[in-house]
Amino acid sequence: MHLFKRILFATDFSNEAAVAREEAVRLALRWGAELGLIHVQRSLSSSWYSFDRFYSQVNDQLREGARTQLKKEISAITALGGELETSAILEGEGAIYEQISDFAESWKADVIVSGTHGQDQAEVFAWGTTASNLVRISSTPVLSVRTDQEPGFQNILVPISFTPACREALSVGVALARQSDRCTLHILHACEPIGLSSVMVVSDASTSDYAQQVEEAAHQQMDTFLGDFDVSGVEEVKKVVVRAQPHVGILDYASNQEVELICMPTLGRRGLSGMLLGNTAERVLRGSRCSMLTLHYSGEGE
């Protein structure tokens, strides 16, 4: 399975992006993929005509600075052993994440690699981050690399909910695990917490008995789901069922097991509906302390 043929590294020239750069180059070398580099330059503008000349001068300086930074970025990639197929500075009216997504689609990238870091929770709630918005709208898989990680993944987590989208994510997780040295692949299913209304419909079973039945059924579903799945070539595979809301169970397990990469599908939604609804993948991304690979899924349900 040739997982990546074209890898697009999106940078803002920050320290966070420097960590993502190493991962993008590592993946390109491991998979023999073409590597692309883009930076989206913000332009300042004003509705006041009298400020046009001032903003024009400032934007010229910003562009010149971006060109200088891009040359440094290219040199850093070359020093890591990478070779660029394309590089560009984008400047337009669209949001940064929209421009990145559109460029990735036109360049036919197999994955977008970008850095991500924690942000004030109030700001995240109101506006989201470039990383989470990119995850939400991009039809191209997005690898969001955390800033405090070393390149490479020895613990990969694939959360599953027994859907076709999860099979696709698991295929990618297995491929990555095979290409990583001494890698453990964690396959996790989170059972929703048991509510009183659920208990009442099952004869006289106690809450604990019913919860146990649900957990046993989940283990059986997992065995059936993974029955014909080829995980050969993976150093170690752990199959786990936890009792928690999906995003909580995923985050807690990832933290306890020192997971370095979470691989899972996401529902792509543009516009207001996407901002309001979100999905499990976005919640995990915002709370995760590790890198995350999200794969766009256009079907209904997660």
Image (cartoon, helix red, strand yellow):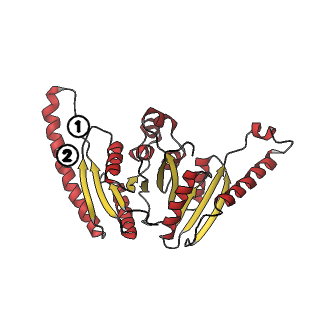
* Residue 127 place in picture, x, y as percent: 42, 37
The 10 Å Cα crowd at callout 2, few under 14, some 14 to 19, many 20 or more, is some
**Of the pair 212 and 140, the residue shown nearer to us:** 140
x 32%, y 44%: residue: 99
- Residue ID at (83%, 45%): 206
Near mark 1 (Cα within 10 A), the count class, few <14, some 14-19 or many ≥20, is few
Looking at the image, is mark 1 or mark 2 earlier in the sequence? 1
Asked if disc 1 and disc 2 are in contact, CB closer than 8 Å, the reply is: yes
The amino acid beneath tag 1 is Leu
Marks 1 and 2 sit apart, C-alpha to C-alpha, by 9 Å
Which amino acid lies under the numbered mark 2 shown in the image of this protein?
A: Leu
Camera-side residue of 25 and 160: 160
Q: Residue most toward the right?
A: 204
Quadrant of the image occupied by residue 96:
top left
Identify the disc placed on residue 81.
none
Q: Tell me: 267 left or right of 64.
A: right
- Total marks placed: 2
Q: Looking at this view, is 44 or 296 the one in front?
A: 296
Q: Where 234 sits versus 60, above or below?
A: below
Q: Quadrant of residue 160?
A: bottom right
| 103 left or right of 269 in image | left
* Residue holding disc 1: 44
Which is more toward the observer, 240 or 289?
Answer: 240
Q: Which residue is mark 2?
A: 62
Q: Position of residue 148 (x, y in %)?
A: 43, 59
Q: Position of residue 263 (x, y in %)?
A: 51, 56
Query: Label 1's element?
Result: loop
In the picture shown, does residue 287 fall above or below 35?
above
Locate residue 256, reporting x and y percent. Answer: 59, 59
Secondary structure beneath label 2: helix
Is residue 23 found left or right of 232 in the rendered image?
left
